[in-house]
Image (cartoon, rainbow, N blue to C red):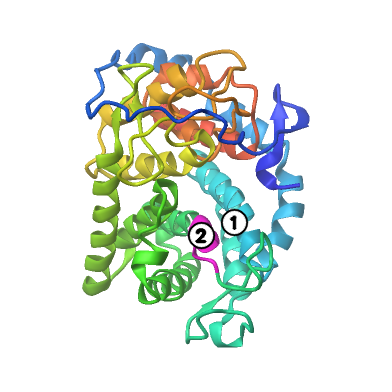
């Protein structure tokens, strides 16, 4: 059972939700080329104190604390990068809890997972079925039909949150001043710069970083964005910035006014396409996970963008109750899995956070990001 599939319904009952629904919607004409959505209602500052406090979501998160560790440690020690893909949700949840509470036990767990992943890396030349056989370290995958090759998707999926962990350390003055944490940070940053980003860039950025789908490229945009903030090397910083800005610009060009609600965004996961049904909501989480962090660090993504993405969630993908649409044009049906991206939009508008408090598909990653939303909203 995958970690993302273990859901706490009604804050306690375990259930299983499947992966995103198949692409059953019929493709339509292109969505009209109107890029700017209509403005929505401004967030209410008075509603900020109505949202549930961090302590509420911390208590929900703790319900799966022991279970997460039992499942997460074996994944972190695996030499198959597909397991690290699944582990990424646990790294994100612990980083979010650390940012929400300042409690170092969450930071320590995220560090343990990430350091275990690094320790499991092997020289590419020693991976028998690798198609690269070069000097970099990495992991083979024999799952999902990969036949023992190295897979950029699995690595980028994990390291978008591995680099977010490093950002959280850098942003916390107390942790940053601790020599022990600094040494661990330095080791992980060196690995991420050389054996993740540089490795795949040198192997062919057009194929491995500037990916064929919006969500796949968004993982690399987040990695590049984080590393550009952290690196001490001017040449590397310039490369990270170029990669980030290129993907961000392409993603911006995908956005159009949603045909279902004029205040929302529509986008296709296929570059240079505007055909319906557009991006599927499950993979759309990856796009949102990137734009939220980029917005919070002051790049070209704006509050207006976050409001439009939030409208995509609350008016199109999840119009109410337990109705969950599979695509960003409001078609198809899905399971309501928002924990890896869409949930993070609650940090900008208490109305969105209050709506998410009623959501019935809750796991530890969802709870952790709701805690962080509450911290940012309530101050």
x%, y% of residue 318?
51, 20
Name the one closer to the observer, 92 or 99.
Answer: 92
The residue indicated by pointer 1 is 85
- Given contact means CB atoms under 8 Å apart, are the residues at marks 2 and 1 in contact? yes
- The image shows residue 214 at horizontal and vertical percentages of 39, 47
Q: Nearer the viewer, mark 2 or mark 1?
A: 2
On the image, the x and y values in percent for residue 171 come to 37, 52
Give the percent coordinates (x, y) of residue 243.
28, 60
Residue at left 56%, top 87%?
125
Above-or-below relation of 194 to 306: below
Q: Quadrant of residue 13?
A: top right
* In this view, 218 is above or below 142: above
Q: Which secondary structure type mostly characterizes the magenta part of the structure? A: helix
Q: Is residue 116 left or right of residue 305?
A: right
Task: Judge whether residue 152 is colored magenta.
Answer: yes
Per the rendering, the mark at residue 153 is 2
Q: In terms of secondary structure, where does tag 2 sit?
A: helix
Ranked by sequence position, the earlier of labels 2 and 1 is 1
The residues bearing labels 2 and 1 have C-alpha atoms spaced at a distance of 8 Å
Crowding at dot 2, Cα within 10 Å, few <14 / some 14-19 / many 20+, comes out as: some
Q: Quadrant of residue 203?
A: bottom left
Q: Secondary structure at mark 1?
A: helix
- Start-end of magenta stretch: 151-158
Residue 379 appears in the picture as rendered: no
Q: Foreground residue, 218 or 370?
A: 218
> Does residue 245 appear to the left or right of 66 in the view shown?
left
| Depth order, front residue of 77/82 | 82
What's the residue at 50%, 34% (across, down)? 281
**Residue at the spot x=53%, y=31% of the render?**
370
- Evaluate whether residue 108 shows in this view: yes
Asked if the stretch drawn in magenta spans residue 269, the answer is: no
């Amino acid at each position: 059972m995958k970690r993302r599939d273990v859901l706490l319904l009604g804050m306690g009952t375990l259930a299983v939700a499947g992966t995103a629904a198949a692409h059953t919607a019929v493709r339509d004409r292109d969505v009209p080329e109107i890029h700017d959505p209509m403005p929505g209602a401004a967030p209410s500052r008075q509603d900020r104190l109505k949202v549930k406090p961090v302590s509420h979501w911390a208590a929900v998160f703790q319900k799966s604390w022991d279970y997460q560790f039992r499942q997460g440690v074996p994944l972190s020690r695996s030499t198959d990068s597909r397991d690290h893909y699944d582990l990424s949700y646990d790294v994100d949840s612990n980083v979010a809890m650390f940012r929400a509470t300042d409690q170092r036990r969450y930071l320590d767990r995220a560090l343990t997972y990430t350091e275990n992943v690094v320790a499991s890396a092997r020289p590419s030349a020693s991976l028998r079925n690798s198609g690269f056989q070069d000097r970099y370290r990495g992991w083979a995958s024999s799952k999902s039909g990969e036949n023992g090759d190295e897979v950029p998707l699995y690595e980028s999926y994990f390291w978008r949150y591995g680099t977010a962990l490093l950002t959280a350390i850098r942003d916390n003055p107390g942790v940053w001043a601790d020599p022990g944490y600094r040494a661990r940070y330095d080791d992980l940053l060196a690995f991420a710069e050389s054996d993740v980003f540089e490795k795949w860039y040198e192997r062919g950025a057009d194929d491995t970083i500037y990916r064929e789908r919006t969500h796949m490229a968004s993982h690399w945009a987040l990695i590049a964005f984080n590393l550009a903030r952290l690196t001490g090397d001017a040449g590397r910083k310039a490369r990270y910035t170029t990669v980030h800005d290129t993907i961000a610009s392409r993603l911006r060009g995908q956005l159009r006014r949603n045909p279902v609600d004029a205040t929302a965004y529509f986008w296709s996961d296929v570059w240079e396409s505007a055909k319906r049904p557009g991006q599927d909501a499950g993979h759309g989480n990856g796009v949102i996970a990137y734009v939220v962090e980029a917005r919070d660090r002051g790049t070209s993504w704006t509050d207006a963008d976050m409001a439009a993405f939030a409208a995509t969630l609350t008016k199109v993908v999840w119009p109410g109750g337990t109705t969950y649409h599979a695509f960003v044009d409001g078609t198809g049906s899905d399971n309501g899995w928002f924990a890896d991206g869409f949930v993070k939009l609650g940090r900008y508008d208490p109305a969105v956070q209050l709506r998410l408090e009623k959501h019935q598909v809750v796991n530890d990653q969802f709870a952790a990001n709701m805690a962080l939303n509450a911290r940012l909203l309530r101050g």
